[in-house]
Image (cartoon, grey):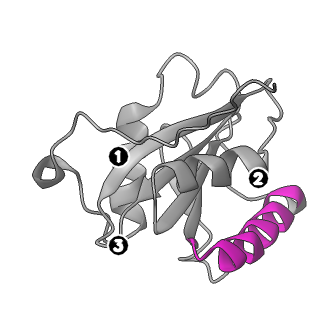
Amino acid sequence: MLPEFQIQLIYKSDVKPSLRPKITGSRDAYNVLLESWDGSKIEFVEQFKVMLLNRANKVLGIFEVSTGCSTGTVADPKLIFAAAIKANACGIILAHNHPSGNVRPSQADIDLTKRMKEGGKLLEIQVLDHLIVTCEGYYSFTDEGLL
């Protein structure tokens, strides 16, 4: 007899829906992300995070996908979309920091954003933006017409 294989998908938040911040644009997303970023790492190592949003664009949570080195980190689409699916998110905002303080996207950043947008279409999870975050400002792919 084979053992029973059981998988559970559970999402639980300790934040009441009425207390979740609503994202109406890139500035809102940046402010929420900056609050959640570890200040000792933002200028030290590159990190990739995803903000998970419900249908009303209220924040369900922020998932830290990876922490890398001073010049890069890995953004695994499987992990990003697994987090979005588990939270039953309708939309996501991708985010990573540039420890150098330069907010301009690299070609790798642009290519990843395009791939993630295509993956989101298939899963019916809208990629709303991709922010490059620094302690002094940010770059929004949506605001710049790249998404």
Whether residue 103 appears in this view of the structure is yes
Q: Quadrant of residue 71?
A: top right
Please name whichever residue, 93 or 122, is drawn nearer the observer in this view of the structure. 122
Instruction: Name which residue lies at 81% across and 38% down.
Output: 74
Q: Nearer the viewer, mark 3 or mark 1?
A: 3
Q: Which residues are magenta?
A: 108-125
Q: Earlier in the sequence, mark 1 or mark 2?
A: 1
In the rendered structure, the answer to whether residue 140 lies left or right of residue 88 reads right
Q: Residue furthest left?
A: 18
Q: Secondary structure at mark 1?
A: helix
- Residue 32 badge: 1
Could you classify mark 2 by the number of other residues whose Cα lies within 10 Å: few (under 14), some (14-19), or many (20 or more)?
some
Q: At 49% across and 37% down in the image, what residue appears?
A: 135
- Whole-percent x and y of residue 44? 66, 21
Q: Is residue 141 above or below residue 61?
A: below
Q: Badge 2 is on which residue?
A: 77
Which secondary structure is most common in the magenta stretch? helix
Q: Quadrant of residue 94?
A: bottom right
Q: Nearer the viewer, mark 1 or mark 2?
A: 2
Q: Answer yes or no: do the residues labelled 1 and 2 have beta carbons within 8 Å?
A: no
The quadrant the N terminus occupies is top right
Residue furthest to the bottom: 145
The secondary element bearing badge 2 is classed as: helix
Name the residue at 53% across, 38% down.
8
Q: What residue is pinned by disc 3? A: 55
If you read the primary sequence from the N terminus, does the residue marked by circle 3 or circle 2 appear first?
Answer: 3
Q: Which mark is residue 74?
A: none
